[in-house]
Amino acid sequence: MKHGKKYAESAKLIERARLYDQKEALELAVKAASAKFDETLEVHIRLGVDSRHADQQVRGAVVLPNGTGRNVRVAVFAKGDMAKAAEAAGAEYVGAEELVAKVQNEGFMDFDVAIAAPDMMGLVGRLGKVLGPRGLMPSPKAGTVTPDVAKAVTEAKAGKIEYRLDKTNIIHCPIGKISFGADKLEENFVALVDAVIKAKPAAAKGQYIKSCVISSTMGRGIKMNPNKVGSNANAEA
């Protein structure tokens, strides 16, 4: 693959075979970002579990202390007082049967997070084939099926992200914009990694975090020492 001059120059800063310490890796990611737009920093964590087994699933949600830097559009499936509470909390789209029909029949997908009141899941369940592949299906584990829809909207707007294993046992998550700077990105990174560690299944054996790589939207991947990430980054491996 042929890359541009800016990519080639920034890539020279990164040693491909080296495992960087957490702080140094994040500082390097900020320094090496060369795009004209504000790049997003993504984290890719490979876990020592097997996602094919139900007792080794890793999924949850965490509120990043510094947000994601994105303007999150929220759709809420609710009615009555819950619908009013969702609107008051700042949800862009609120509705019940009519919102389900709009998604199902018109392909409406102009939102980043979907939240549902528990009594709406009988209807929202019909949207599994539409919302599921996009990672938008409301789930109790992610806190997006809840009677407190207002709180869920507020958290989504504040930078709550969902993490979950893909079929290759890797978690992929954005943790903010390069413009945040290394310190704020590290705070977000630690919040995510600590949540993933806390969610370790009892059935997981051996090394839990196998590898951890960060990369900006247009940047090269930076490998981190998997034994020294999260709030225990300064502990001995």
Image (tube, grey):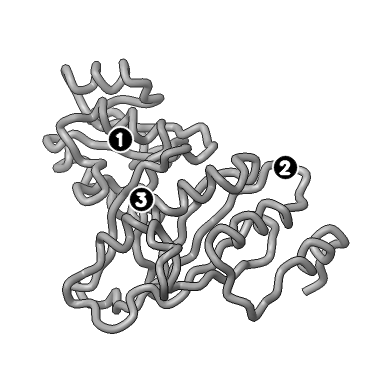
Which corner quadrant holds the C terminus? bottom left
Distance from Cα at disc 2 to Cα at disc 3: 25 Å
Is any atom of residue 108 visible in this view? Answer: no
**Residue annotated with mark 2:** 37
Q: Which residue is depicted at the point 77% across and 52% down? A: 34
Kindly identify the residue that appears in the image at 33 percent across and 80 percent down.
207
Q: Which badge, 2 or 3, is on the more N-terminal residue?
A: 2
Query: Badge 2: how crowded within 10 Å, few (<14), some, or many (20+)?
Result: few
Residue at the far bottom in the pictured view:
206
What percent of the width, then of the height, locates residue 60?
Answer: 28, 54
Q: Which residue is the site of mark 1?
A: 101
As displayed, is residue 223 above or below residue 62? below
Residue 197 screen position, x and y as percent = 31, 63
Of tags 1 and 2, the one toward the viewer is 2
User: Which of marks 3 and 1 precedes in the sequence?
Assistant: 1
**Disc 2 residue type?**
Phe
The front one of 159 and 21 is 21
Residue 112 position, x and y percent, is 43, 40
Along the viewing direction, whichever of 65 and 137 lies nearer the viewer: 65
Where residue 229 sits, quadrant-wise, is bottom left
Other-residue count near label 1 (Cα within 10 Å), few / some / many at <14 / 14–19 / ≥20: some
Kindly report the distance in space between the C-alpha atoms of the residues bearing marks 1 and 2. Answer: 37 Å
Against 186, residue 236 (above or below) is below
Q: Which mark is residue 162?
A: 3
